[in-house]
Amino acid sequence: MLARTASMPERSAMYNANALKIGLFGANCSSGRSATKVPERWSASWSDCLKLARMADDAGIDFMLPIGRWKGYGGDTDFHGATLETVTWAAGLLAATKNITVFGTVHAPLFHPLIAAKEFVTVDHIGEGRFGINLVVGWNEGEFEMFGVKQNEHDARYDFAQEWLDVIKRAWTEPDDFDFVGSYLNIKGVRAFPKPYGDTRPIIMNAGRSPVGQSFALRNCDAFFTATVDSRHSIEANAKKVEETKSAARQLGRDIEVYTIGQVVCRPTQKEAEDYYRYAILENADWGAVEQMMALKNITRQTVAADEYAKQQQYFAGKAIGGYPFIGTPDRVAEELANISKAGMRGIAVSFVNYLNEVPYFRDEVLPRLVRLGVRQPH
Ligand SMILES: Cc1cc2nc3c(=O)[nH]c(=O)nc-3n(C[C@H](O)[C@H](O)[C@H](O)COP(=O)(O)O)c2cc1C
């Protein structure tokens, strides 16, 4: 464990020497990353989140990454219908834990940058330097309508986000009052104290997939989350993506860490794991919610042929929502996770159908194997 001193590399390393960082993804949203009707699906209640964060902290899990989601996707379960707001969620969890990094996921167009800067500083002090930011610009039109906020066209969202983040970074660092005059933001006499914890700043991540989204991440972020169609299918594709991202960052004189996401179903036998994955994720998928998510990406029975639609349904339920499926015995899951590390990924944010039921087995069986495979330190 590294001491929490004022150094950005230590912050980015989440104050430990694990080569492969492991995080939990999506626990603030009902059903997590599994659009399923099974009765044990994730509640996302505060008490479950709190138990989970303490369990993860004790287990040496490195981070928790929530989803910024404001409106459910419908279906029988109203997938993501109940969500806890991520910055206040992080504040509560950071106050109750010691080592784990907790992210807040923030839609730049929905929060005034000075309110956001102040919230981030507050949460960062609560967590003594363990808060991180997932900056998102939004893709789900219905959510923006709900706020009465008109979404910019796609690429302009990242132009806005650039100004938004520039204001925040200045508010975190400038000792004197400053003005900011941009194309979107025009603010005067900004004065903001205190600054983030220990003369550092929260680590910043982004998961843009478009060229403009990725270039935003390369210019501004410490961590880039990728979950491309290819990386959802194969480990090799991850290695290629890491190399492309890191070399593009180097051309800008920057170093960026690459992360991905995945869904874990780990059981004592391969058959048990595969059976449960099929049962929970495919046979009991909440197809209404899956179809709603597909429709938001303009994949409907009207826009694509019937066989392509059926293929997309399986892909969305099976891989797109949760990410690459790590299905199998502890040996198999650990080996696949170690391969991701060997591909150059700095970490992965994983989800489980029911985190509280399934993290203990993962902690007891998979994490020690990752130590033996040389990608994590003993905890
Ligand atoms: C790991 C990960 C986490 C994400 N979290 C959110 C989120 O919480 N809220 C959200 O609206 N979008 C989220 N997104 C969507 C991205 O921010 C981004 O909008 C999307 O990948 C499309 O890329 P583009 O904006 O460059 O078109 C996430 C994507 C990934 C891969």
Image (tube, helix red, strand yellow):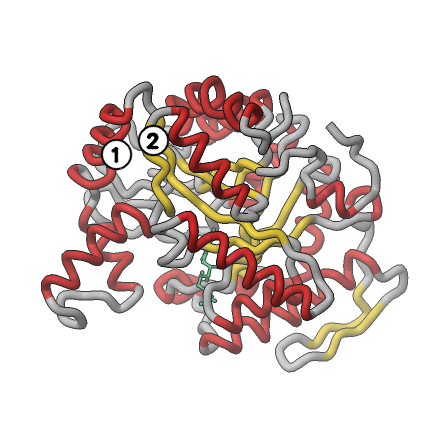
Contact (CB < 8 A) between labels 1 and 2?
yes
Q: Is residue 327 left or right of residue 378?
A: left
Q: Is residue 331 above or below residue 163?
A: above
* Residue 338 image point, x, y percent: 50, 36
User: For this rendering, which residue is in front, 338 or 133?
Assistant: 338
Res 265 label: 2
Q: Amino acid at mark 1?
A: Tyr
Quarter-of-image position of residue 325: top left
* Residue 349 image point, x, y percent: 49, 41
Q: Secondary structure at mark 1?
A: helix
* Residue 256 image point, x, y percent: 65, 56
> Label 1 to label 2, Cα distance in Å?
7 Å
Res 277 label: 1
Identify the residue shown where x is 45% and y is 19%: 365
Is disc 1's CB within 8 Å of ligand 1? Answer: no
Q: Is residue 184 above or below residue 243?
A: below
Res 129 label: none
